[in-house]
Image: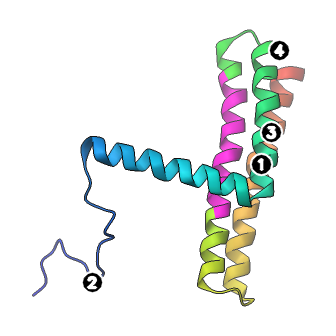
Amino acid sequence: MKDSNSSSHEESPFKGKTGLRRLINAMGYSYEGFKAAFKHEDAFRQEVFLAILLIPLALYLEQDAVPRVIMIGSLFLVLIAELLNSAVEAVVDRVSIERHALAKRAKDIGSAAVFVALTNVVVIWGLILFA
């Protein structure tokens, strides 16, 4: 009989670190992820440059803290969505580069998430600046 805590799959050898070592490892993995996204993903680079332009603009245009936070937060949401979309695309391509309806669906849904996040920026900035 299997132990209730065990699974049929082996745990990753990268699991099991705790405390400060885990935090340091996580920061390193995140840095590598940012570096890979910036190097390999044109859309991520464009969205980073957009954020670099718009964050100071939000700080300049809006005097109240809450609208500033919402405006800047909407930009970070785009970056998060793009990173997740890029991760999905990389995994799908790793599994197979053959055309498949499920692979297309996964990539299209990831792209839709980025589109929603970008639309969110336009709506939030429009409402705050022009309403």
The answer to whether residue 30 is left or right of residue 116 is left
Q: Which is nearer the eye, 120 or 35?
A: 35
Name the residue beneath numbered marker 4. Answer: 61
- Disc 3 crowd rating (10 Å Cα; few below 14, some 14-19, many 20+) is few
Residue at the spot 67% in from the left edge and 55% down from the top edge: 37
Which of the 4 image quadrants contains residue 131?
Answer: top right
Look at label 4 and name its amino acid: Leu
The answer to whether residue 121 is left or right of residue 7 is right
Look at label 2 and name its amino acid: Ser
Name the residue beneath numbered marker 2. Answer: 8
Q: Quadrant of the N terminus?
A: bottom left
Task: Identify the mark nearer the N-term, 1 or 4.
Answer: 1
Give the x, y percent position of residue 11: 29, 72
Which of the 4 image quadrants contains residue 113?
Answer: bottom right
Give the x, y percent position of residue 48: 75, 41
The answer to whether residue 31 is left or right of residue 16 is right
Whether residues under marks 3 and 1 lie with C-beta atoms below 8 angstroms apart, the answer is yes
Residue 45 numbered mark, or none: 1
- Disc 4 crowd rating (10 Å Cα; few below 14, some 14-19, many 20+) is few
Task: Identify the mark nearer the N-term, 4 or 2.
Answer: 2
Task: Identify the mark nearer the N-term, 3 or 4.
Answer: 3
